Image (cartoon, rainbow, N blue to C red):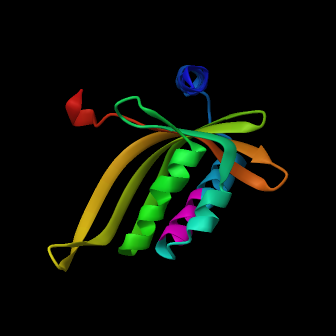
């Protein structure tokens, strides 16, 4: 697991160093389309559709540096069954392309209703992520997602 975490961090570092390079407009369009698809799947609470976009070797790294493998993420996604009106709006801020993988820096705004104390309450979240996507014969797959620290906490 430490090797996967190191790999994701190393990929993000390399991409950061190369981020001054101009973006490939076609790759940016393709990557934004993946996030638009993700937003639609979230709105439908289509867990299977969301999981289909995750590579088998997918890892997620939270803001505290904890690494979660695909199986753990699958369990976390089951929480979608307990929410109403899930919404996600993901904006691609920057994309770096290298052969078969892209690193995307994105801003996500999400909201959903959750039952608390017998009534439905709206919860909201805004976060930034660095995500690695791999181009495959079946389309783009998420390989690594790392939540970035809030700029206010720096």
Q: Is residue 40 magenta?
A: yes
Identify the residue at horizontal 36%, vertical 35% (top origin): 63
Main SS type for the magenta part?
Answer: helix
Is 55 drawn above or below residue 39 in the view shown?
above
Quarter containing the N terminus: top right
Q: Is residue 123 left or right of residue 142?
A: left
The quadrant in which residue 150 appears is: top left
Figure disc tally? 0
Which residue ends up furthest to the right in the rendered image? 137
Q: Is residue 126 left or right of residue 16?
A: left
Question: Against 111, is 102 above or below?
Answer: above
Up-down relation of residue 152 to residue 77 (above or below): above
Examine the rendering and report whether any part of residue 20 can be seen.
Answer: no
Q: Quadrant of residue 14?
A: top right
Q: Which residues are magenta?
A: 35-42
Q: Quadrant of residue 144?
A: top right
Q: Give the quadrant of the C terminus.
A: top left
Frontmost residue, 89 versus 57: 57
Q: Residue at x 51, y 65 (%)?
A: 39
Relative horizontal placement of residue 138, taking residue 72 as reference (left or right)? right
Q: Position of residue 44 (x, y in %)?
A: 51, 76
Task: Work out whether residue 52 or residue 150 is closer to the camera in this orientation and state it.
Answer: 52
Visible residue check, residue 55: yes
């Amino acid at each position: 697991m430490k090797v996967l975490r190191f790999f994701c961090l190393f990929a993000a570092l390399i991409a950061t160093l190369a981020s001054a390079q101009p973006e490939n407009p076609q790759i940016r369009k393709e990557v934004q389309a993946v996030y638009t698809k993700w937003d639609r799947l979230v709105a439908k609470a289509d867990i299977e559709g969301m999981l289909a976009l995750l590579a088998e070797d997918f890892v997620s790294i939270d803001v505290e540096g904890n690494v979660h493998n695909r199986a753990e993420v699958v369990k976390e996604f089951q929480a979608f069954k307990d929410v109403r009106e899930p919404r996600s709006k993901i904006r691609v801020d920057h994309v770096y392309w290298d052969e078969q993988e892209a690193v995307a820096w994105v801003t996500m705004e999400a909201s959903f209703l959750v039952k608390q104390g017998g009534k439905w309450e709206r919860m909201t979240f805004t976060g930034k992520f660095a995500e690695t996507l791999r181009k495959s014969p079946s389309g783009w797959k998420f390989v690594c997602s790392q939540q970035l620290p809030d700029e206010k906490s720096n």
